[in-house]
Amino acid sequence: MARQTGVWGGRLPLRAGLGLLLFLAAAGAGRASEQAFGTVWQAQAADPADPGAVLRECDALAKATPDDSFAAVAQTLGAWHLLNAGRVPEARAALVSRLAEASDPIREGARELARAWLTLLDLEAVRESLRAYYRLEVRYPDSLAALAAHPRLPAAQRPPLTDRWGQAWNYQLAEFTQIRGLGGQRYRIESPKVPGVPGLAEALAIPYGSRMSVEPVRLLKGAGGAAAVQFRRTGAAAADAGLVLQVGAAADGLFLAHVGASWILVCDGLHWRAWPVPNAQ
């Protein structure tokens, strides 16, 4: 019997053999990337009082494989820890580096997280400009356009009038609940893309990943054979119906960025969360 040297009982055609080798190499690289990410996530899940371990793992992954998609996760996760540590310039630089056009769902999720946190940093600049305006006028402006038009407000104190998605801030004056008729003394402001989060401090006070009250149950095949995950609700939302997400799609504020051999990766616009793949070998 002739020795079989290929999957068809003969030699592999050169092009097919090269394609198979490239596929196997890519699969191996993907698994290695997942393993490196797993080290980062395990450091994050340990939630040490000192974030140094997480930052070291994030930095190591980003430097070792700067072009890998998981490097984007490491940079945005590390930026959150930098912001918590008050290292704003470093965090801003890491976030800005993720604003380039996304080429896959992981990078897309990282870009949205970067936009959200940069928006919250910009919002701090808007608040500082509002304080400067108040010192001049003893009231807040009726609209943010007054910040750009005020003759005594230096150019350096004129903030961006849109968030990182190019949408105008939701800004309005607010009345005191007990004192009527005293206008311009309070205001409300937020980004329409980061609703319910009025500022950086409030965002950093949210425990990391705590808004994602789901956990994966099983893997599915989505449209066109794409990977999908069935999630079940946990906590207060446990009585609600489950949720099915396909890679690259969003629902209920959750975006499924990755389903691999070992890890499922989701983001909610502010945080990442990862779970081991159910029944993964």
Image (spheres, rainbow, N blue to C red):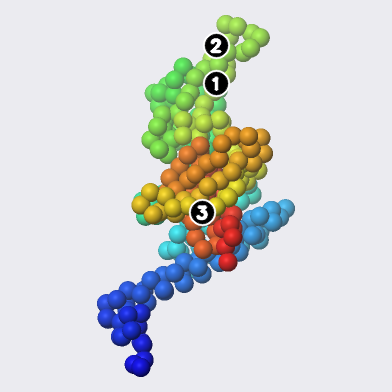
On screen, residue 23 above or below 207: below
Identify residue for label 2: 183
- Quarter where residue 27 is shown: bottom left
Visible in this render: residue 90?
no
Q: Secondary structure at mark 3?
A: strand
Quarter of the image with the N terminus in it: bottom left
Q: Which is more foreground, mark 3 or mark 2? A: 3
Identify residue for label 3: 219
Identify residue for label 1: 187
Visible in this render: residue 277?
yes
Q: Residues within 10 Å of mark 1 (few under 14, many from 20)?
A: some
Percent of width and height locating residue 196: 56, 30
Q: Secondary structure at mark 1?
A: strand
Q: Give the residue type at disc 1.
A: Tyr
Residue at 55% x, 26% y: name it.
131
Q: Give the residue type at disc 3.
A: Leu
Residue at 54% x, 23% y: name it.
188
In the displayed orientation, state which residue is furthest to the bottom: 1
